[in-house]
Image (cartoon, grey):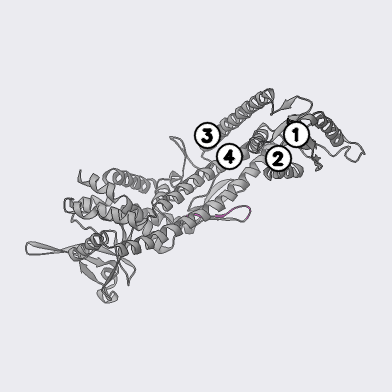
Amino acid sequence: MSKRSTTVPAVRCAIYTRKSTEEGLEQAFNSLDAQREAAEAYIASQQHEGWVCLPDRYDDGGYSGGNAERPALKRLLADIDAGKVDAVIVYKVDRLSRSLLDFARMMQVFEAKSVAFVSVTQHFNTNQSMGRLTLNILLSFAQFERELVSERTRDKIAATRRKGKWSGGFPILGYDVDRERMRLVVNEKEAERVRAIFDLYLEHSSLITVSRILSRRGWTTKSWTSRKGVPLGGGEFNKNNLHALLTNVLYTGVVKYKQERHPGEHEAIIDSATFEKVQKTLRANGSSGGMHVRNKHGALLKGLLRCAPCNAAMTHCFTVRGAKAYRYYTCCRAQKQGWDTCPSKSVPAEAMEQFVVDRIRAMGSDPELVAAAVEAAGAQEREAAEAIRAEAAALGREVRRLAADLRKTAATAGKSGHAAARLADLNEAIRRGEERLAELAQEVEAAEARVLDPGEAAAALARFDPVWESLTPKERAKLLHLVVQSVSYDGGAGTVSITFHPGGIRSLGVQVPEATA
């Protein structure tokens, strides 16, 4: 009969020691040595469990336990992440950390890597039920501390904004940040652009149209450089960030806290009358469909058709001869600078609209057309996703820097009278950064989701023709804006180029039945 194996798997134990001051470290046998000796004795007592002491020393002499900025601790965490450690042994819990927040984070790392934590003099071992109970108690206190800090931060932000002060975070287009006085100061060049954006929206009443105009002008969102020299912002305008700009009350010299509005210390860029007029238009468009409602003459390509040679929009117009009205799309540049400046000039509206509709119909039965259109549109979406990822990476680095600054400020909170205000500013900046990171993640996901395969596109486009004839002019315009991103017309060459929305093609099968209901 064979003997049963009694081999116990080895438990690799790392000993961590710390002393707050450098006093006495020059002695032959100092506090760090005493802590290590006690830990080694404990490990020896657990040899029957397979415990072995690792030769590497993790000693932080002269480092506070109030933060995690310690070289030996960082080396220990790196070795844990690399899978070199099975248990961490300390003399007392406070040797590892005096910050409950940091301690809770470390315990999460330990748990993720299945690393036990043992306190020699406090009978604290997360391999045992009592040790885990103690850990849960400590985590409860950590949660209490976090909530208490959050409450104080919210109170500080509320008090700051009620005094009309800017409470920190990322700057907005039109203003720079005076870091010494922590207040917003007008950037005149950007302020002119902000005023122009408000005027453009009042003129066109369409977020998409205005964002396209801004893109053609090369105007971008606010760009700035972090304290570490990292460039941030500077992205293209889209429907979402343009709406955020147009609804930001900071531009009227007001600071907002929840539903409260308070006069701000900063100078206004937009007068209250203009701002309220824009809000009224936004609300009306949000509930009524915006430009599609004002499309009285059934101009299907309104906001879509562009003159390729002039790189200008083509506006819908009509003339009446006798009892009949004739509709046209006319190049805006030709209208403003003369017919001889544009090879396209104008094109009959019905013919151009019918051509675009026929091309969509034809795509449903031509796999090559579907594949070409989907590939071109998909390349745009992938490029957009990469740009968003780059912005997110830069913002992530900035948030991590702010978090490190927060930990340092918290560690010295008792030594500075400005610490509370600084903590509140940092917390708010981190919160805004994390919110923006979440938005960017959603934008990347949305861009990737808009990329579809030719088979999926063909199946969706096959549903276009059967219901087109039953749609009202308003529904037809909405459907074309859903599927088509832009139509480019070159009157000189006699060519038309159509760019499609992949996501619009995908949702075609859902939107068309809804429109006919």
Relative image position of residue 35 (x, y in whole percent): 83, 33
Alpha carbon of mark 2 to alpha carbon of mark 4: how far? 18 Å
The residue lying at 65 percent from left, 23 percent from top is: 133
Q: What quarter of the picture does the C terminus occupy?
A: top left
Relative image position of residue 441 (x, y in whole percent): 48, 48
Alpha carbon of mark 4 to alpha carbon of mark 3: how far? 13 Å
Quickly name the residue at label 1: 7
Proximity of marks 3 and 1: CB atoms separated by less than 8 Å: no
> What type is the residue that disc 1 sits on?
Thr
Disc sitting over residue 158 in the figure:
3
The residue lying at 75 percent from left, 45 percent from top is: 71
Proximity of marks 2 and 4: CB atoms separated by less than 8 Å: no
Q: Which mark is in front, 2 or 4? A: 2
Q: Which numbered disc flags the more N-terminal residue, 4 or 1?
A: 1
Quickly name the residue at label 2: 68
Q: Which mark is in front, 4 or 1? A: 1
Q: Can I make out residue 85 in this image?
A: yes
Q: Secondary structure at mark 2?
A: loop
Quickly name the residue at label 4: 427
- The magenta region covers 221-228
